[in-house]
Image (spheres, rainbow, N blue to C red):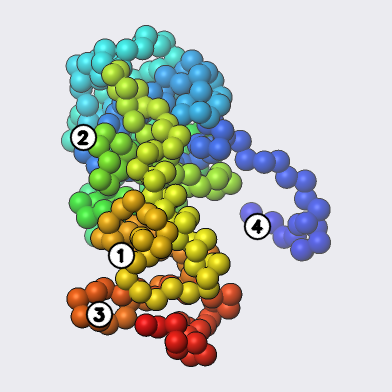
Amino acid sequence: MSEYINGSELINVVTTPGEEVVKDFLPIGVTILGAPQKIGKTFFCLQLSNAIASGDEFLGHTVQQGRVLYCALEDTKEKIKKRYELYGFQASEQIDFIFNNSIHSFDIKYELDYFQKKYKNIQLVIIDAFAKIIDKNTEAKYLLEYDEVSKIHDMALKYHLVILLVTHVNKHIDYLNPFDSIYGSRGVTAAADGMMVILKEQDVLESKKLYVIGKDIPEEKLSLKQDNHLTYFVVENDEHEQADEEDITKVIHYIVKKKKYYGTHENLCAVLNLKITSRKLSSKIKKYKSVFDDNFIKISYPPRKAMARLIEMVYVCNDDMTIEEVFEDDTSYRH
């Protein structure tokens, strides 16, 4: 039944903040977890399950203690047992596993109804992998996946818990837009309350990035590593990223102060006393282009002079101004 309300009444409605099973991390509803194969999704899910079951923090976030239903639809009992042994924590009676490798669709509604009647304190349901509960015999992929995730979302709200749908990512990963890499149609992500993606850190050995976004929770990008027991922990400030940020900060402060720069990357390294090559500086500037945009610094690349690769960087208070407009009254700056 439709509910009618005017704007004045809406503003005066008393609302309560959305509850989260993991504070600022996992809101009540459906969250999608995407990651490549062999990156450690199962260890991540087992660690999360153990944190919920024990009430311990997860990656620095407080949790609501409760029961976990882990639907292992791609793994066998032997594989999960081996991962438990490698992980090094005690198996908990608060974590229930369902193993189902049947080619037939997995009925999450039936299983959830059964366990919810048996246990009243379920906080988290993990479905690994989401593809196992989707009917593949259809051409209307977007509508089907949107409808399926919406139904699961309704179940999560009905029982006041989190359902984590585990899936893969596409082969071609866009590191600038990691959530676009989640496998499936837009229908999967459109109906979700939150999304998480785990990717290998580019050019950093044994380091991973966890990207988190969701309704009413802060967006996060965490650097993760695993210890000898394969337990994930947050790297507060990765050495490579810290060095990158320090160099980029120097460049930004210089451009804001001087208003503009026209010249080579090599000369800019010398001016700022950066202990990196011109090629490395060029790579960092491209990597952090969005940071320059956020600081109103426009970047362009004029034609080469001789063999030198040139760059123009301009601090633009009026974001609509072009580089040519900024330089038109000061052409002597270009040398």
Q: Quadrant where the C terminus lies? A: bottom left
Image depth: mark 2 or mark 4 in front: 2
Q: Mark 4 and mark 2 in contact (Cβ < 8 Å)? A: no
Q: Earlier in the sequence, mark 3 or mark 4?
A: 4
Counting other residues with Cα less than 10 Å from the Cα at mark 4, is it few (<14), some (14-19), or many (20 or more)?
few
Q: Mark 3 and mark 2 in contact (Cβ < 8 Å)? A: no
Say which mark, if any, is on residue 38. Answer: 2
Image depth: mark 3 or mark 4 in front: 3
Say which mark, if any, is on residue 266. Answer: 1
Q: Quadrant where the N terminus lies? A: bottom right
Q: Mark 3 points at which residue?
A: 304
Residue at 44%, 82% (x, y): give it.
333
Q: Report helix, strand or loop for mark 3.
A: loop
Q: In this view, does 184 lie above or below 238?
A: below
Say whether residue 10 is left or right of residue 106.
right
Q: Mark 4 points at which residue?
A: 2
Q: Which amino acid does label 4 sit on?
A: Ser
Q: Distance between the residues labelled 3 and 1?
A: 14 Å
Q: What residue type is labelled 3?
A: Arg
Q: Earlier in the sequence, mark 3 or mark 1?
A: 1
* Count of numbered badges drawn on the protein: 4
Q: Distance between the residues labelled 1 and 4?
A: 65 Å
Q: Distance between the residues labelled 1 and 2?
A: 40 Å
Say which mark, if any, is on residue 299. Answer: none
Q: In which quarter of the image is residue 82?
A: top left
State the residue in front, 306 or 241: 306
Q: Report helix, strand or loop for mark 2.
A: loop
Q: In this view, does 134 lie above or below 94?
A: below
State the residue in front, 107 or 34: 34
